[in-house]
Amino acid sequence: MTMAEEGDILTNLDNQAAGQAGADTQPAAGIITQYVKDLSVENPNSPDVYQWTDQPKVDVQFNIGAQPKGDQVTEVELKINVSATSEKGTAYLIELAYCGLIGLRNIPDEQAHAFLFAEAPRILFPFARRVVADAVRDAGFPPLMVDPIDFNGLYLQQLQAKRAQDEAGGGDGAVPPATV
């Protein structure tokens, strides 16, 4: 996507056809921009790690968060933590907070929540995946290609778990943020 196309998304969010009496009633959702908010790369046992012969165990953890940044803009944050360890110690640690500013207008809360915690992370993930692969490669290791994630499926699982908890009398009725 070129810079002009990214600008068109923002423009389209702001300039949808107005309804009767000037009221803007058209639903709109889109990625305004995306960026690396925080990136940490640790290679604590270099240069010794490059002589290790055992294959490290790689652990990948995800978390998704959303914070309103204005009336119609929300920052969605995809956190990815990667640790590679072996019997001799830690090979590398990668911590990434990859974000997107999401514009939402005239979308019901339930649909907005689904977009922010399922669809937006799905859109952001390939870019975050590339940042992780490059960071691992830049640390001196073969690039790590994180497996694709079914964010929509995970969102539905968490929604079902929350409903079951509410039916059992232990919930407050609010839809939880997604943690993967």
Image (cartoon, rainbow, N blue to C red):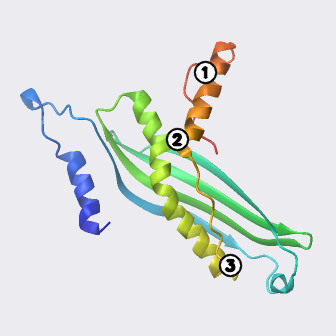
Q: Is residue 31 visible?
A: yes
- Identify the residue at horizontal 60%, vertical 71% (top origin): 133
Task: Name the quarter where the N terminus is drawn.
Answer: bottom left
Up/down of 83 relative to 159, above or below:
below
Q: Position of residue 93 (x, y in %)?
A: 72, 68
Name the residue tied to disc 1: 163
Between the residue at mark 2 and the residue at mark 3, the CA separation in whole angstroms equals 29 Å
Between the residue at mark 1 and the residue at mark 3, the CA separation in whole angstroms equals 42 Å
Name the residue tied to disc 2: 152
The residue lying furthest to the right in this view is 87
The residue lying furthest to the left in this view is 21
Name the residue tied to disc 3: 142
Amino acid found under the numbered disc labelled 3:
Pro
Residue 134's image quarter?
bottom right
Helix, strand or loop status at disc 3? loop
Helix, strand or loop status at disc 1? helix
Helix, strand or loop status at disc 2? helix
Relative to residue 41, is residue 91 drawn left or right? right
